[in-house]
Image: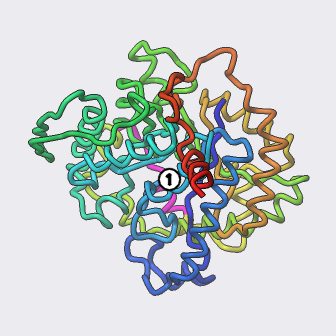
Amino acid sequence: MKVLWFHLMPYQDLPADFKDKHNSVWVDIDPGLFDPLRGHQHYHEYMDQLEYAAKAGFHGICVNEHHSNAYGMMPSPNLIAATLARNTRDAALCVLGNSVALYNPPTRVAEEMAMLDCISGGRLIAGFPVGTPMDTCYAYGQNPAKLRDRYYEGIDLVLKAWAADKPFAFNGRYTQQRYVNCWPRPVQKQPPIWIPGGGSVETWQMCAERSFVYANLSYFGHQASMTHVKGFWGEMKRLGKEPNPFQAAFLQFVGVAETRAEAEKLYHEPANYFYNRCLHTDPAYANPPGYTSEATVRARITSQVLRAAEESRKATRSGGGAKFFEEGHVIIGSPDEVAEKLLNVCKEMHVGHLLLLLHFGNMSRDLTKYNTDLFATKVLPQIKHLYEKEWEDHWWPTGMPKHLPKGAAHAKSTFATAGVAAQ
């Protein structure tokens, strides 16, 4: 099993009365709440945490795209990934993703992801989310009824740009380009494609049909996501596809401590901050007309985003933390307890890629390091061997080719050495 360290990069200084005095953390959040100096500190601290996770032994590190919000301060995950590509060596770089429907033309996504794959030496995982309604329809003004068609066309253009051996013309419904010619080109012939999903029939179908990874991103633990993941495996079965667990991924909040009692004490406040401030979204922004398809409505599938918006209105600051632990939204406990729970979750959901939020809410630098260290040293060794003898992971970065021209690898150290020699 592959275990990846996932970061949302939330803004940590929302006031205690945020839910009472502000309509939403997304779309219409008061820009006056953002302090650029604190933003500077947040970004550097968060990039330090991702780089630390890469060195601690996690198989990959993850970034993602959101707009006009304090829930996740990464309007451009590619900027963050570029620094990580330069400052890490072995961990996969999982960009979940770029919302291709927001780019005109989507060729920009093909070019920037190719750059990331080159800089990192073939370590890119390319994620293509449809995008939340808040990001796509409200912050970026896309028509919800046309969003998914625009998204499909964007993915087709990106993949064709990577594969083409000569310039070509693209004449789509939303994008027309006389010359598509992706320079640079990715190290990998095609980086692995992961599709984040929060609850739509079409996403299951696309992942199953096109052999993409279905990555279920959940705020509420695996029980709340079983319907979604089972829906994906149902599509795989319907198409006669091999049920390889590495074609699925799942996101889980985790807090590790020496004992469960200590974990409850340490992670109560970060959980409260996340669920009662970071998820305080106006439900009107979470489900615009036309965004959810008829097939998904008929299947009675509720998106994680809409549920989060509705749940955040009901939760109370005083009792929220305990509820989130008891219902498994956040898995907490001793290392052995957490390892056992995660193994059960991954087996029950049949997923081979586990995405972890080991930082959430307003978690401090020290607590994030403590959580990361305990997981890396005492939990990861107990779970990472799941599936390794049964299945092959076809959705993992391949890295650099085995046979390289002399001097092609380690360009950074070669330059530094040359500088010393010249002196």
* The N terminus: image quadrant: top right
Q: Position of residue 256 (x, y in %)?
A: 80, 52
Q: Is residue 5 above or below residue 389?
A: below
Bounds of the magenta segment: 298-311
- Magenta includes 375? no
Q: Main secondary structure of the magenta part?
A: helix
- Colouring scheme applied when the structure was drawn: rainbow
Residue at 65%, 38% (x, y): give it: 59
| Left or right of 416 in this view: 201 | left
The residue lying toward the viewer, choosing from 289 and 96, is 96
Instruction: Determine if residue 228 is in view.
Output: no
The residue lying toward the viewer, choosing from 265 and 3, is 3
Residue at 14%, 47% (x, y): give it: 174
Secondary structure, mark 1, is helix
The residue lying toward the viewer, choosing from 301 and 342, is 342
Q: Which residue type does callout 1 highlight?
A: Ala
Q: Position of residue 138 (x, y in %)?
A: 30, 66
Q: Position of residue 87 (x, y in %)?
A: 59, 52
Instruction: Determine if residue 111 is in view.
Output: yes
Q: Position of residue 364 (x, y in %)?
A: 73, 69
Residue at the top extreme? Answer: 240
Q: Quadrant of the rendered structure where residue 269 is?
A: bottom right
| Left or right of 179 in this view: 186 | right
Q: Which residue is mark 1?
A: 81
| Left or right of 212 in this view: 170 | left
Query: Would you call the spot at circle 1 few (<14 residues within 10 Å), some (14-19), or many (20 or more)?
Result: many
Residue at the front extreme? Answer: 423
| Left or right of 60 in this view: 211 | left
Residue at 81%, 58% (x, y): give it: 370
